[in-house]
């Protein structure tokens, strides 16, 4: 598939970003394209808005998985593209339009030029939330086609086109959403002693949260708690009866994630006594760390050398990816694909260079062939 066709697909997908488990137009588009290139060696199954495509090999000893995510983000696009999002308030600001296009390009190649082993292309919904990987893995569809190994990619605005990056071991952090609801007693602003002010309670809680990291965890155990949103009250002259904090937790160790949540619960109990209120914590979606298998990373390096693509040694990041659930149970790895954008992931002006599409497709195809060369990995 040449760059012109890849660019066309990417731009069409870019215009229809949809949120997790609502990717109906995306699902329809992908199915239509997949059926247009399928032959007798291809089987297709669906799960919710996700799609699994199995291409049989010529003499298979294993099932190699390649996963792409398909959802968008609730962001108003500001790229100025003439092919910008047609869904106001939604945008492919994390590059999933790129990921899907690369998967389709690799799928077409594997259909036309079959490799030895079976290949499973996984078009997974809801990566940005509430999380599609774990429930997909528990589905009958996935259990029937359970890969022996698996890999995935993610665009990286900070790397130039023609560069890929990965590393052995931890690549992405453990992550968890964080929602904290406060319930006190409202009242007139002139009589604060007759009320239980949740604006004050929530504000104080934010300050104390930072002490969890600074004074309770080993400094060598990296962790972050960020409160990104606070809402409280309705009018300027009334005591706020309720408040809500929304944030995220990031750790480089799953044990530390459990410790942070336990410390948050203890802090909440103390604040309930101090402010005579009720506090409820909800952790929303939690993603497991992305941990790369060493032998797969080494074979990936070998592929990049053969292709003449520059390989960079990545550093672990506090970003989250629910592909970590797949790598928890299935050996494999994830890599960064350089797309050279001035604006980063989740930014309204993210503009990846489309030349990276060809690099991504070629890399995926050659990695599939590399994994198929020696049969099943023990």
Image (spheres, rainbow, N blue to C red):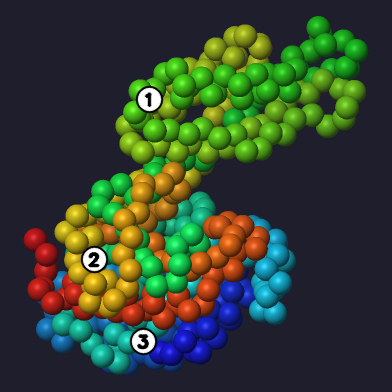
What residue lies at 23% left-to-right and 77% top-to-bottom? 306
Q: Is residue 348 left or right of residue 354?
A: right
In terms of sequence position, does the residue under pointer 3 or pointer 1 come before the other? Answer: 3
The disc label shown at residue 219, or none: 1
Task: Give the image quarter of residue 263.
Answer: top left
SS at mark 1 in the image: loop
In terms of sequence position, does the residue under pointer 1 or pointer 2 come before the other? Answer: 1
**Of labels 3 and 1, the one closer to you:** 1
What residue lies at 48% left-to-right and 34% top-to-bottom? 224
CA separation in Å, label 3 and label 2: 24 Å
The disc label shown at residue 108, or none: 3
Closer to us: 298 or 5: 298
The disc label shown at residue 301, or none: 2
Pointer 3 with pointer 1, Cβ within 8 A: no
Residue 200 visible in the shown view: yes
Q: Is residue 182 left or right of residue 199?
A: left
> Can you name the residue that lies furthest to the top here?
193
What residue lies at 22% left-to-right and 54% top-to-bottom? 293
């Amino acid at each position: 598939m040449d760059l012109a066709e890849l660019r066309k697909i990417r731009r069409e997908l870019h215009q229809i970003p949809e949120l997790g488990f609502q990717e109906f137009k995306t699902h329809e588009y992908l199915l239509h394209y997949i059926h247009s290139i399928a032959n007798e060696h291809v089987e297709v199954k669906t799960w919710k808005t996700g799609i699994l495509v199995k291409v049989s090999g010529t003499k298979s000893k294993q099932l190699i998985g390649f996963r792409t995510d398909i959802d968008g983000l609730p962001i108003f696009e500001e790229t100025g593209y003439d092919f910008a999002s047609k869904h106001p308030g939604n945008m492919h600001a994390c590059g999933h339009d790129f990921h899907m296009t690369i998967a389709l390009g690799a799928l077409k190649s594997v259909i036309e030029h079959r490799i030895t082993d079976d290949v499973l292309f996984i078009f997974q919904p809801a990566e940005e939330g509430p999380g599609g990987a774990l429930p997909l893995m528990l589905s009958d569809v996935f259990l029937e086609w359970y890969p022996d190994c698996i890999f995935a990619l993610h665009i990286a605005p900070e790397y130039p086109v023609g560069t890929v990056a990965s590393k052995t071991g931890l690549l992405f952090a453990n992550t968890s959403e964080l929602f904290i609801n406060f319930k006190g007693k409202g009242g007139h602003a002139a009589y604060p002693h007759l009320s239980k002010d949740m604006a004050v309670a929530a504000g104080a809680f934010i300050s104390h949260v930072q002490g969890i990291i600074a004074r309770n965890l080993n400094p060598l155990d990296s962790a972050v708690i960020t409160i990104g949103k606070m809402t409280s009250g309705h009018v300027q002259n009334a005591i706020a009866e309720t408040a809500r904090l929304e944030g995220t937790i990031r750790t480089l160790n799953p044990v530390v994630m459990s410790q942070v949540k336990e410390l948050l619960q203890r802090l909440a109990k103390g604040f309930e006594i101090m402010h005579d209120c009720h506090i409820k914590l909800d952790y929303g979606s939690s993603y497991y760390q992305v941990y790369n298998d060493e032998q797969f990373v080494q074979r990936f390096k070998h592929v990049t050398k053969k292709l003449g693509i520059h390989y960079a040694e990545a550093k672990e990041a506090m970003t989250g990816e629910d592909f970590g659930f797949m790598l928890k149970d299935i050996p494999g790895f994830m890599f960064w694909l350089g797309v050279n954008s001035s604006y980063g992931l989740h930014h309204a002006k993210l503009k990846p260079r489309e030349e990276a599409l060809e690099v991504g497709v070629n890399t995926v195809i050659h990695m599939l062939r590399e994994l198929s060369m020696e049969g099943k990995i023990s």
